[in-house]
Image (cartoon, helix red, strand yellow):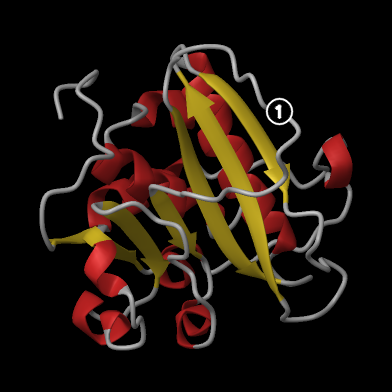
Amino acid sequence: MAKVNEITVWVRGVLQDKEGRDVMNAFGQALAKEGKFTQMFDNYEDLPDRVLVPLRKYVRYSDAELEHKYLYTNDHPEIVVIMEPTIVKGMNILKGMPDGGILFVNTNRPADYILKFIPNADVLGAVATVDCFGISGVQTVDFSGSEGGVDAAGLGAGIAAPMVGAMARITNLVKKETLAGIVKDVSAMERGYNEVKFQKLKKFHTMSSQHGG
């Protein structure tokens, strides 16, 4: 049976619900275009209509057809993405992460500062930081794309664009050229790809060799 890999994206309710959807959809679509079987979905226990409440978005991908499509949480995410940095202070964001996972944080602070707030950071293989607010300056609020609808504002028009660029650079799972055909703000995506800061903590296992990583 082919391994199923998991990505969990944390955002703040209402203000970032759209951005979280864009991260999961853009990166998930890029994985699919490059031959992976994928699934993208919300955590249905979260309350996206509540302002600033932490929300989770999920991506699953595998080299084979996903057999268990009706499991509505990611229990063992190898990649965790934080779109609002204060989330690291009060949530067990790395719950279930296997040893050697990667954490991405939207912040202009250094990785060592972020790690001080994560009690179980010893599971991390690496941490990557990218200043999505500084790069994009846009936080898109749009409810038209919920539950499979078409996003009227376009996919990746705000801070999601630099984040998926950073994810592509560090994980080597998808090409930035693939993302360029998906996200609306290609320039911000490329800046995220080029400007992400990366700190390796120990051996990490989420890199793909398909693009020479």
Q: What residue is pinned by disc 1?
A: 69
In the picture, measured across the screen, residue 16 lies left or right of residue 125, that is right
Which three-letter amino acid code belongs to the residue tagged 1? Lys
In front of the other: 203 or 200? 203
Residue 161 lies, with reference to residue 123, above or below; the image says above
Give the quarter of the figure containing the N terminus: top left
**Which is more toward the observer, 211 or 161?**
211
Location of residue 55 in the rendering, given as x and y in whole percent from the top left corner? 69, 66
Q: Residue at x 44, y 23 (%)?
A: 178
Could you tell me residue 145's position as x and y percent?
A: 83, 44
Residue 37: quarter of image: top right
Q: Position of residue 174 (x, y in %)?
A: 37, 28
Residue drawn at (45%, 46%), measured in percent from left and top?
164
Classify 10 Å Cα crowding around label 1: few (below 14), some (14-19), many (20 and above). Answer: few
Residue 182 in sight from this viewpoint: no
At 23% from the left and 79% from the top, the residue drawn is 110
Q: Residue at x 60, y 20 (%)?
A: 66
